[in-house]
Amino acid sequence: MKQEGNIRLASHNSATGEPIYDKCDFFALFAKPFAQCQTKTLAEQYKAGVRLFDLRVRWHEYTYRCAHGLVMYDKTLYGALHDLQKVHNAAQDGTQCYVMVTYEGKLEEIDYEDFIEDVKSVFAYFPHLTLVKVAVKLPTWKTIYTKPRLGNQAAFVCDYPKLIGWKALLPIPWLWKKWQKYTPPNRLFGKFSMRDFV
């Protein structure tokens, strides 16, 4: 994908291009079209130029598993980071690889402070990846987040519809995929353009 000037590429809901977890319930199969924002795997996205990955997770069977809404994917958080570090190390292109992690489950399932520490402890195994944001998605279309890379443990609230507009409320991303080339990229997180269907 062509980069626009010095704007670098980020992928939205990055793990949704991975296979679905084989223990997903029946309803998750019907939810797949509503949840899928990528068709490439994490490694394929990296090779396509992505350098900021948006990983969403849920707590399931004693691990954080990649998820989006009702759908869980074959990759755990550890497995996703392993794949990214492997392809990043093989590339040796001098770029940095950034990752943000958001909790997609119910807020009452976790403690926010513990979640931050859990994520940071997993990242300790992957020194070539940079954790830029840890967040918990709230049911009110808002997200509470912190930025560990900056040493700032304060929690901030982000209002998604105000930040990225009407697309935040559209439930089937692939319906507007064909329109994406006609709309400007969402320039979030500094000089990154976050995209569905990289």
Image (spheres, rainbow, N blue to C red):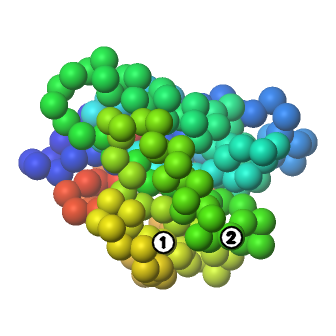
- Horizontal arrangement in the rendering, residue 18 relative to residue 93 (left or right): right
The residues bearing labels 2 and 1 have C-alpha atoms spaced at a distance of: 13 Å
- In which quadrant is the C terminus drawn? top left
Is residue 62 positioned above or below 133 on the image? above
- Horizontal arrangement in the rendering, residue 10 relative to residue 42 (left or right): left
Amino acid residing under circle 2? Asp
The residue depicted at 88 percent of the width and 43 percent of the height is 25
Q: Nearer the viewer, residue 121 or 97?
A: 121
**Which dot, 2 or 1, sits closer to the camera?**
2
Q: Nearer the viewer, residue 57 or 111?
A: 111
The residue depicted at 18 percent of the width and 42 percent of the height is 3
Q: Residues within 10 Å of mark 2 (few under 14, many from 20)?
A: few
The residue depicted at 61 percent of the width and 62 percent of the height is 115
The residue depicted at 59 percent of the width and 54 percent of the height is 118
Residue named by callout 2: 111
In the drawing, what numbered circle is on residue 145? 1
Extreme residue in the right direction: 26
